[in-house]
Image (cartoon, rainbow, N blue to C red):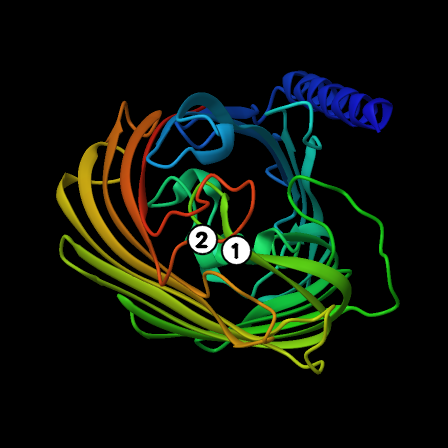
Amino acid sequence: MKQTILCLQGGIILLLLLFAGQASAEADPPASQAWNPGNGFTINLPDQQANAKVLGYIQSTFNFYGAHENGAVSNEFYVRRARLDFIFRYRDRYELFFEFDGAGSARTQMVLAQMDMEYLTDHFIRVGKFITPFSPENNRSSKRLSTVERYSALNSLFLLPALDTQFGVMLFGRIQNLDYYLSVTNGNASASANIREDNNHKDVQLRLAYPIRDNIRYGLSFYHSNHKRQTLKLVGHSFSAYNEVPVTGRRYGMLVDSEWYYGNWHTSGELFLIRFHEPLSDDHQAGLFYGSYSELGYRLHGDDRNGHQLIGRIEAGQIFDRHPDLQGVSRLYSLLAGHNWYTADGLFRFQTNIIYHLPDRHSDLANSRYENRNGSFEFLLMLQLSI
C-alpha cells in the first residue's frame, strides 16, 4: 500500500513537471498560473484545453472533554486532517481528482480517487472512490463545514461503516433545475480505510435536490444496502460512544434536507431514517435509527474569506424498535454553540464549538468515557490553514 501511494505521489509530481515544461515551451499564447488563497494553485495550458490544480489544508485541533471515565483523556491536541488534493481537467469534460490524508499512522493516505466524464451536456459519470450522495452534510468538504465535526447521528453511520467515501460508480447531473445523483457502491469502505468488498450486495443511493429560489434549496435522498454484522454506535462529536448495538442484513433509508439564506442569516437541516429490515435477534438488536440536525447561523460581518459567524445547532440520534436485551442509552440530543472566524483572504479559519450531550438515561456501556454518566460537554477548537 505504501509503495502504491509513493508511486501515485511520484506520478503526480512528474505530471506537474511535464505540465509545467510544456506550458513554458509554448510562447504564444503564454501559459497562465494563478494562486487563490485557500483554493489552491492552478496552471493552465497555453491552448486552454487543460489545467492542473494543487490545493490542501491542515486542521489542527484542541479537544477538552467533560467526561473521562475509565482512564479516558480529558484533553488533547491533535491534527484532525492533513490533506493534499490534485485535480486535472481536460476540455471541461474530463476530470481526475485525488485526495490524500497524512493525519496519522492508522489512516490510509487515499481518501478520494475519482474520475469524472461529461457524456452529455450537464450529465456526468463518476467512477473510483468518491463521497456518496445520501447526505449533503457528508458531501460538504471537511474544510468548509460550519462545525468542527459533522452532526453526531451522521458520525454513527460513518462508524458502521456506511455512507462516507466508497468504491463504485455514480451518475449525476441536472435536468432543468433538478439536480440528481445515483450511486452504486461496495458500501463498506470509509475515508480512513480502503476495504475490499466483503459480500455480493451493493449500496444504492439516490438523491434529488431542487432550488425553490436562488437562496432556498430542498433535497430528498434514498438508500438501500445489505451488510454482514456491524456495530451501530450512538456517538457524540468526538466519536465516543454512549451505546452500541449489533445490526445485520438489509436496510432502507430516507433523508430530507433544506438550506435557506437571507441576508446575514442562514439555516440548514437534515433528517434521516434508516430501517433495518431483519427480524430482531441476538445478532440484530435495532429496527430503526433516526438522526437529525437543525442549524441557525448569523454572519456578524464579512464573508467566508474575511469575517465572523455565529452558529447554533440542535442534533438528535435515536434507536427505535429495540431488542428486549438492549439496555442503556437509546436517544442522544446534542446542543452546540459555535463561532467561525475567517481571515487572511480564506487562508485561515478558526472554529470554536461548545457542545452539550444529553442522553435519555445514564450510559451502561462498559469502558466508555461516558459510563454511568447522563450528560456531558465537549469543547472543540480548530485552526485550519488552506493553501
Q: Is residue 147 left or right of residue 300?
A: right
Quadrant location of the N terminus in the rendered image: top right
Q: Is residue 357 left or right of residue 95?
A: left
Tell me where residue 164 appears, x and y as whole percent.
61, 53
Q: Nearer the viewer, mark 2 or mark 1?
A: 2
Front residue of 158/256: it is 158
Front residue of 367/306: it is 367
Distance between mark 2 and mark 1 Cα atoms: 7 Å
Rendering quarter of residue 86: top right
Count residues near mark 1 (Cα–Cα under 10 Å), then give few for <14, some for 14-19, many for 20+.
Answer: many
Residue at screen point 27% across, 55% down: 313
Front residue of 312/362: it is 362
Which is nearer the N-term, disc 2 or disc 1? 1
Q: Is residue 386 left or right of residue 184?
A: left
Rendering quarter of residue 329: bottom left
Tell me where residue 383 appears, x and y as whole percent.
36, 25
Q: Is residue 254 left or right of residue 69?
A: right
Tell me where residue 372 appears, x and y as whole percent.
42, 47
Residue 88 drawn above or below residue 233: above
Q: Secondary structure at mark 1?
A: strand
Tell me where residue 140 appears, x and y as whole percent.
46, 51
Count residues near mark 2 (Cα–Cα under 10 Å), then give few for <14, some for 14-19, many for 20+.
Answer: many
Amino acid at the residue labelled 2: Ser
Label 2 with label 1: CB-CB less than 8 Å: yes
- Asked whether the viewer can see residue 133, the reply is yes
Count of residue discs = 2
Read off the residue under disc 2: 363
Tag on residue 243?
1
Residue at screen point 56% across, 40% down: 367
Amino acid at the residue labelled 1: Asn
Quadrant location of the C terminus in the rendered image: top left
Q: Secondary structure at mark 2?
A: loop
